Image (spheres, rainbow, N blue to C red):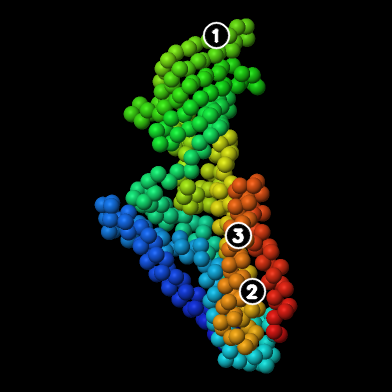
Amino acid sequence: MLKTIDRYIIRKFLSTFFFLALIFSLIAIVIDFSEKIDDYMEEDIPISGLLGDYYLNYIPYINGLLWPLFSLIAVIFFTSRMAYNSEIISVYNAGASFFRMMVPYLAAAGLIAGLHYMGNHYIIPEGNKSRIDFENTYIWKHNYENKSKHIHIFLNETDKLYFRRFQIKDSTGIDMTLEKMIDGKLVSKLNAQRASWNTEKQSWSLKNYRIRNIGPIKETLIQGSELDTVLAVVPGDLARRDNLKESMTTNELIEYIDSERKRGIGNVQKFEVERYRRSADPFSIIILTIIGMAIASRKVRGGMGLHLALGAGLGGTFIFLSKFSTTFSINAGLPAEIGVWVPNIIFSVVTIILIFKAQK
């Protein structure tokens, strides 16, 4: 059963946390608006779209990124005040242990982590669909992550498509090869110097093509200067938006990763990192809450200022380590789940050390 001190700490934690979230949300909106005001002035943007589609969904998006840090700052802020006012010492004098006092902190952190988990996996991605659609329409019109060189795609179980280079700006591929394999044997091979996407016909126009058909007895060769053909691929499969992963729920993200792998496209590390990050961040809230409590529960000469400085240092270290490990996963082949969870693992060790060094 929760006692008076438990309810007091939970109320302090949640009120401070959500107050911080509100303040930082307002600051983030002001900064974002000031950065994009030139784009807003150039485009004929409806107010309902700006407020409803974009900023209404921008608030949960930015909070989803910052909630772990908010938890650390909130805990340090109100716990340091409790220590300064000798409330922590009074709790110890009443017979409560340090581990018993952790209970309300963990209860509040667990509630916030649960909300964050649901938000990361379902609520925020659904809101991001409208937010990102607004950004792609008015702000980032050409924000593509173009897999521009040496593109390999399996169109189906037998057909493999290759482009030496692909240009998204004019939907044109250079040095195209289409191979058909049946029972492990090459039966046909199409080469084209250039392949351009025809939007009106929804087909590909091939320039200077050669089709080599390999039969059981002899081969045939067909050549020409121009050929229109339909392939099971469109330019959107060869270039995707940088922010596409943010607009997918976790189930959609898993399906997309599996689909890309089956087609042999690869380069899905960013999507895997996003998938595992959504579960790792809520766990970070619990870790940072305990760290904040262990630091701020000790009454020191520097008071709240020293506690906040220590918290800011730890928070900055956590962010740096997170960015470093995820970048290592995306660019250096480190498994995504390891890259995402490394900061939590390291800070879990730090948490254990701080717990046993905390004032008892």
Question: Secondary structure under badge 1?
Answer: strand
Q: Amino acid at mark 2?
A: Ile
Q: On the rendered structure, is 227 left or right of 52?
A: right
- Depicted 70 relative to depicted 154: above or below: below
**Rendered image: mark on residue 291:** 2
Query: Is the residue marked by circle 2 packed among few (<14), some (14-19), or many (20+) residues within 10 Å?
Result: many
Residue at the spot 58% in from the left edge and 25% down from the top edge:
158
Q: Earlier in the sequence, mark 3 or mark 1?
A: 1
Residue 262: x and y, percent?
58, 36
Query: Is the residue marked by circle 1 packed among few (<14), some (14-19), or many (20+) residues within 10 Å?
Result: few
Q: Amino acid at mark 3?
A: Ser
Q: Farthest residue toward the top?
A: 217
Please name the residue that numbered disc 1 is placed on. 220
Please name the residue that numbered disc 3 is placed on. 322
Alpha carbon of mark 3 to alpha carbon of mark 1: how far? 56 Å
| Quadrant hosting residue 341 | bottom right
- Depicted 110 relative to depicted 198: above or below: below
Q: Earlier in the sequence, mark 3 or mark 2?
A: 2
Residue 328: x and y, percent?
63, 51
Alpha carbon of mark 3 to alpha carbon of mark 2: how far? 17 Å
